[in-house]
Amino acid sequence: MRWLERGLDRLQHRVLSVERTDQGLVQRVRSMPAHSAQGIETTFAWRLDGDGLRLHTDIRPFGPWDCTWPRVGARIGLPGALADERVRWFGTGPAESYSDSAEAAYVGRFEAAVDELGVAYGRPQETGHRPGLRALDLGPLRLRAVASGSTGLPGFQLDRHTAQERTGVAHAHELPPSRGLWLYLDAAQHGLGSRACGPDVLPRHALWPRAVSWTVVLE
């Protein structure tokens, strides 16, 4: 509830600059909740890397943050036709896992359909996050993560609906028609905890605002 009260589900984005450098293209974006003095500044740095396109993402918070974040990362819209492709990844699996719910996860090579990545919970909610991504293959798209910066390897999530669409309904049949396929690349996520029937997230699994960065190569 505190995230909704702070407006984190409806961030406003503004492009600050787009600059072409000797290294490639650099875009700076500021994201803030409406009527707020805090936010984040994201720098996307694109450059050619062999046969692929390297994207380095750097996120830095500003302002008087007084609450945790649910997640920190980027969302990429993909063509809906890719949702019918098989997903192959090298990272953690086989099921979803989070910072405080990862005892059964291990690093390996896995394969699944897009709709098999998530869990059909009774109430629609975000699902299917897998941290520690090394490589992802989805039809013609291949993504390779590069361990760098203070964050290391990102996590990924693929879904036919956005987080906002899932949060806004109480039953699966209320979800709107899919508008495509969404790839989430997260540097970190807040823990799950057991607040529905017990304590909140343990302090070591709470995601407080902090600077993060990660790098992927699209091939």
Image: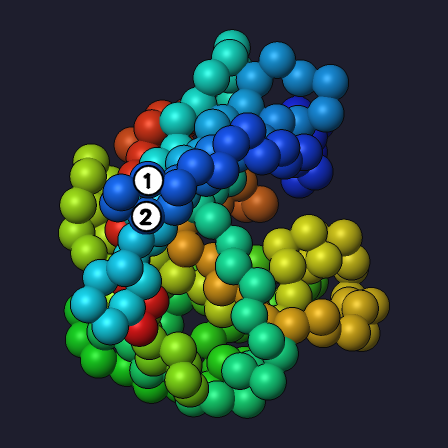
Q: Secondary structure at mark 1?
A: loop
Query: Mark 2 — residue?
Result: 24
Q: Position of residue 152 (x, y in %)?
A: 20, 46
The disc label shown at residue 21, or none = 1
Seen at 24% across and 72% down, the residue is 51
Q: Quadrant of the N terminus?
A: top right
| Three-letter amino acid code of the residue under disc 2 | Gly
- Taking 147 as reference, is 109 above or below it? below
| Three-letter amino acid code of the residue under disc 1 | Thr
- For this rendering, which residue is in front, 113 or 57? 57
- Asked if the residue under mark 1 is in contact with the one under mark 2, i.e. CB atoms within 8 Å, the reply is yes
Crowding at dot 2, Cα within 10 Å, few <14 / some 14-19 / many 20+, comes out as some
Q: Position of residue 79 (x, y in %)?
A: 59, 76
Q: Is residue 18 left or right of residue 142?
A: right
Q: Position of residue 19 (x, y in %)?
A: 43, 37
Q: Is residue 131 left or right of residue 86?
A: left
